[in-house]
Amino acid sequence: MNRIWIPAHLQHFTNGSERVEISGSNIRQVIRALDNKYPGLGEQLREGDMLTPGMTVAINGSVDHLGLYATLDEDSEIHFIPAIEGG
Amino acid sequence: MTDYTTRITTVINGQEETFFCEPRESLLEILRDRLQLTGTKEGCNDGNCGACTVILDGVSVNSCCVLGVEAENASIETIEGLADGDSLHPLQQAFIRETALQCGYCTPGLIMAAKDLLAHEPLPSNERIRLWLANNLCRCTGYTRIIKAVAQAAKELHQKP
Amino acid sequence: MKHAEGQVDFKVIGTTPERPDGIEKVTGRARFADDIHLPRMLFGKILRSPHAHAIIKDIDTSKARALPGVHGVLTGGDFPQLESTVIPHGGASTIDIRDLAENCIARDKTLYDGHAVAAAVADNYHIAEQALELIEVDYEILEPVLEIEDALKDDAPVLHETFSPGRFILQTEKSHSNAGSFKLKLGDADRAFQNADHVLEENFQTRCLHQGYIEPHSVTVEWSHNDIMSVWTSTQGHFAIREQLAFILGHPLNKVKVTPMEIGGGFGGKDQVYIEPIAAMFAKKTGRPVKIAMSRADMLRGTGPSPGANIRVKLAAKKDGTLLGADLTLAYEAGAYPGGPVTSAALQATARYNIPDQQILGHDVLLNKPKMKQYRAPGGLPVNFAMESMLDILARKLELDPLELRLTNAMVTGDRMITGIPCQKIGGKELLKAVQTHPHFTSPLTGRNPGRGLAYAMWFGAGMTSSAVLTANPDGSVKLSVGTPDLSGTRMTLAMQAAETLGIPVSSISVSIPDTDSIAFSFMAVGSRTTHSTGLAVYDAAQQLLRQMTERAALYWDVDETDVTFSDGVFNHQKDSTLTLTFTEMAHLLEKLGGPITVQSSVTPKSNGAQLTAHLVDIDVDTETGKIEIQRYTAFQDVGKAIHPDYVSGQMQGGVAQGVGWALSEAYQYDEAGHLLNTTLLDYRMPTSLDLPDIETVILETPNPNHPFGVRGVGESSIMPPAGALANALYDAVGIRMTALPMTPGAVLEKLKKKQRGS
């Protein structure tokens, strides 16, 4: 099972839980599974065929630019965080 | 061209140059756009950054604040004239060696300003160098290496026969 | 140079070769964007709105068109109408192309003093300027909103009836008529505040300012007969310019070619189009090359400055100084369009300290100023100023040494940041100890009113996609092409990484940054990513090259490929020691063995390696004028591995100088109607050589395990600590706590006088 950290503004979908466990071998599956368990959460995380604009996903601490299309090699820790760049 | 276009003759880097000039054109515009000597840069066009520094009759000036017509019969030195063929001037060598440039945009103006300083003050102190170069803005380096490069070049020039 | 444990001694990395473009730059031969001259070129100028907030009712360009020497006049209506469309801005971030296009030239509304409304192209700039004076714009002036507090009020003037803050930041819903908001949370901050021995709270304000690059924006566009748009411009990212131009003008990507010229400073302000679409449209309509350059006033008014912010910090601590919790509100200016750097600010705010319970509320606030952008570490200095001031306030309240307090709370590898992500390998405590043991830390202070201050910062930087092409030529020379523009010497640091891998002198490698037709996609030079992330592409390309040359060596020796190894620049046969060839010898043989070898690599690393910085500053304060004189400044930074130590040191010094300007003198001044008052470099006051001492740098190296040479990004984090360090030094010197930037002599004096009066 993957450990998902839920962004603060979405924790009302998970009854206030900061961390949930969900299965899935890629991010799409994870989001689908999250939406099944916590209805409405899925459409906050993805918009059409990409992650919600401005959001990115970190898998085991490293940002994966594939976002929605990232795959998971093993049970992973997943964070949804704002996208940052640089100047 | 307007009716006030004038024919100007001047000496740039030791070579006689002739060009046509409207009274409203600055020396910076003449150098960059008419003569295509693009080494001298524009940063602000009102005398506040020093990127356009050239030497006019032995004095460093902001060429954006000099009119093109004022070049008549003057002797002008720009960055293009500093190296002697393939042989770089000690200031140019020192800037490279001391990593006194990052983007390199302010560099021509700085080097010309420094050249003027060293022409009449052979071994300036670091404080004198900082004061002299205060009109040349650099946004990349924080100035530390620039001051060191000028001081190094001063020593080298002083030792030359 | 200190090597971490297990570090190999490098041959090239860590040395200081002279950069190949040095000669070009000191002789004035280097070609910056404005140095282009094409035959029959025309020159454009842009008319900018003098009103902070106005509806454009009508624009009459007839008189301008009739002026002899004018070849065209444009307004927003001449550009394709776009739908609100989010396009990738490379990797994980996005940009709304309609906002971007309307920022370049307004359609119905102008949203800030300086917003482009029309443009003219002519035989020369003087005629173009005359043409602008003949363009008649009928404005209906609206009430502007210029301050964060005002923009957040219910009755504030509204910039956009609808906007999509979620495009750029996490949001629940649009929180105000002029703001989008987001929350970050770790643990339970309320619990921390209940259990604390001490709770401190303070508000801080910083002001909008500009990146201040000395080179103005300049672009030349030529639209050829086969519909190819060729663009030469000053940019940190030519692929981004290509993409944005293609979308804004509705032109296929494969017919837009962008050449990055040498760039005279960017710092985050040159990563998007401003004048390019107008130049391109003129080039298309006139059939001639068109150049547009911005004046300094144009730039200050009409590009992307860095936002001011209102920041509230609340800290919960135990009496031994351990931080239990943090609660921050960050309200950053977004300017005329949503999507400023506030999210980056939130991610950096507390990263470097281990605080188990935290919450951050962020607001991206629309107001009638230019669209705000990043300036080195995006959003970093304001929140660092606030937090580092608070740490100092806490230290003094608890009578603890400020550095010890930071050591007590320093984040170490594995501690969780506010996102919940565990911190990658860092050497935070080692960095702070290096400050503590440095002679500057204990040297005596001199001066009439001397003081010493410290600040500590962390920034992440960007990974993103980079491409490299490497060719081994038959004469032994190597060509390296990369897609990431060189802002200050990365062509050398990349060549050094290639040279180290290939075992050849760096002088054998020539580096170029080709146009968008001639190199694979690369993300822009931002986020301190070039030496690290483009370095990874270079390293990968070098490995591919070695693999192919290994095959050729086996072919040449008529042996099994598996018996051929490469180390220290030499191909060897594992069993036959008579068979050896250096890289260069191998290259000389290539013609006989199939010709030159070219390899390409496109790499997208997953991270960048955190950058940690600490600054120590000594000041002397003139209590009659309020002037702060900086007497000594030492910047400490953990760079993972300094590929070229002088360039690394230069990046640190540059960041310090910019941070000092941000702290002491730079700020946009607006009048009540929203006009920018300080539009020259006389009144927009950037540091000169007289404002800084020699800046000392100390480089530490905790290698980044995700990079073959241990590199961490370098360029940005050094801009963060100066304001906090100076504010803390000021308190140390004269006992006043500045909570607003810039700390100009006038502001300091006013606070001193208040203190003397006992208020």
Image (cartoon, coloured by chain):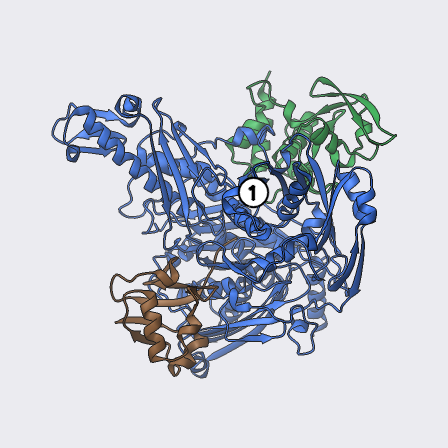
Q: Which chain is brown?
A: A
Is any atom of residue A65 visible in this view? yes
Q: Quadrant of the C terminus of chain C?
A: bottom right
Frontmost residue, B22 versus A53: A53
Looking at this view, name the residue that lies furthest to the top. B161
Quadrant into which the N terminus of chain C falls: top left
Image location of residue C377, percent across then percent down: 51, 56
**Extreme-left residue of the structure:** C575
Q: Please say if C520 is above or below C568.
A: below
Q: Is residue C596 above or below residue C623?
A: above
Residue C493: quarter of image: top left
Q: Colour of chain B?
A: green
Occupied quadrant, residue C151: bottom right
Residue B62 visible:
no
Farthest right residue?
Answer: B3
* Residue drawn at (82%, 35%) of the image: B24
Image location of residue C397, percent across then percent down: 52, 73
Q: Is residue B127 above or below residue B73?
A: below
Quick one: SS at disc 1?
A: loop
Q: Report the chain holding disc 1.
A: B
- Most foreground residue, C342 or B4: B4
* Residue receiving disc 1: B141
Under mark 1, the amino acid is Thr
The x, y position of residue C99, in whole percent, is: 60, 60
Residue beneath the point at 70% across and 37% down: C42
